[in-house]
Every structure is written in structure tokens, then in C-alpha cells.
Amino acid sequence: MNVKSAQRLEPPVSRILRLVLLVAGITLLSWGSIPGTWLHAQVLPDGAWRFWGGLAVTAAGLLFAVWARIHLGRNWSSAVTLKRDHELITSGPYALVRHPIYTGILTGLLGSALAVDEVRGVLAVAIFAIAFWTKLRLEENWMRSQFGETYAAYSSRVAALVPFVL
């Protein structure tokens, strides 16, 4: 993979805890035979719109995440990492939100939860949001230490996950 080498890397315990959350979220969303009737309770009114709307939201979210990953280029890493010669990217999807890959993935998961339309889908999205929020907070601290006032100015004008909101 064509990425820069790491200068600072997230501790393994942090990555493992997040992985456990992500596996729990994936299990809830994808495994339809989980015991517990309350997990299978329907959330929204019946209709084919749930599936097709969920499909559209999933596709839009994943396309946004892919655009962000491509735009980030060699600065990308699956773990919280500061790269050698790390650059602060503020254009493209990063002009809309500071963490567009997470925004795209969460949007895609929200679409999947809409298509599944069960409590387990809502719970899965919440678990993913917690996992990404904890990772995001670590990344934010490292970016502030690396880029100082430049990052502070960027974060004051660009929302973290939801444009103009959060």
C-alpha cells in the first residue's frame, strides 16, 4: 500500500478495544438470528421505501467515504497515526467535515440499519458511533499537537462529523 511511514502510532490496547466494538456492531447489523426478540423489533412503519431508502443512503455514505480515502492519499492509516511529513488535508470532503471517512461509514451503516429496520440496526449504528468518536478524539488531540493553531482554526470552521452541526 502506498502510504507514508508512521511517526507516532496508537497503542495496541486502544485498537483492540475499538475492534471489539466494531465486531459487536457488525454482528448486530449482519447476523439476523441473534436471540432476543426486542433486538428484532421494527422501528419504522412498513414499506418498500425503507429498503430502497436504506440502499440509497448506504451507497451515498460509502461513496463519500471512498472519496475521502482517495483524497487523503498517502496520509491514510487504519490506526490513529501521525505520518512522517504528515500533511493537514482541508480540501475536498475535508472541507465539509474533519472526519469524512467516519461520516461516510456511519452514513452507510445508518442506511443499512434503515433497510434492516430493527432495533439491532439502531444499536449497531450507536456502537459504531461510539467507536469512531473515541478514535476521532485521539486523532483530534494528535492533530492539535502536530499542527497547533492551523488545526485549531480548521476545527473551529469545519464540523467533525456532520456538516455545520457536529
Image (cartoon, rainbow, N blue to C red):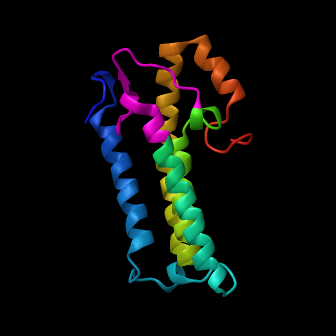
Q: In x, y percent, where is residue 77?
A: 35, 35
Residue in the foreground of this view, choosing between 87 and 81 = 87
Q: In x, y percent, where is residue 57?
A: 59, 63
Residue most toward the top? 149
Name which residue lies at 36% across and 28% down: 74
Name which residue lies at 31% across and 32% down: 11
Residue 56 is a magenta residue = no
Residue in the foreground of this view, choosing between 1 and 166 = 1
**Location of residue 78 (image quadrant):** top left
Residue 78 is a magenta residue = yes
Residue in the foreground of this view, choosing between 141 and 36 = 141
Q: Is residue 122 in sight in this rendering?
A: no
Residue most toward the right? 164
- Segment tinted magenta in the rendering: 68-91
> Vertically, is 146 above or below 45?
above
> Vertically, is 11 above or below 130?
above
Total tally of numbered discs in the picture: 0
**Location of residue 92 (image quadrant):** top right
**Where does the N terminus fall, quadrant-wise?**
top left
**Location of residue 114 (image quadrant):** bottom right
Name which residue lies at 60% across and 83% down: 42
Name which residue lies at 54% across and 19% down: 144
Q: Is residue 19 in sight in this rendering?
A: yes
Q: Is residue 79 left or right of residue 61?
A: left
Q: In x, y percent, where is residue 38?
A: 54, 82
**Where does the C terminus fall, quadrant-wise?**
top right
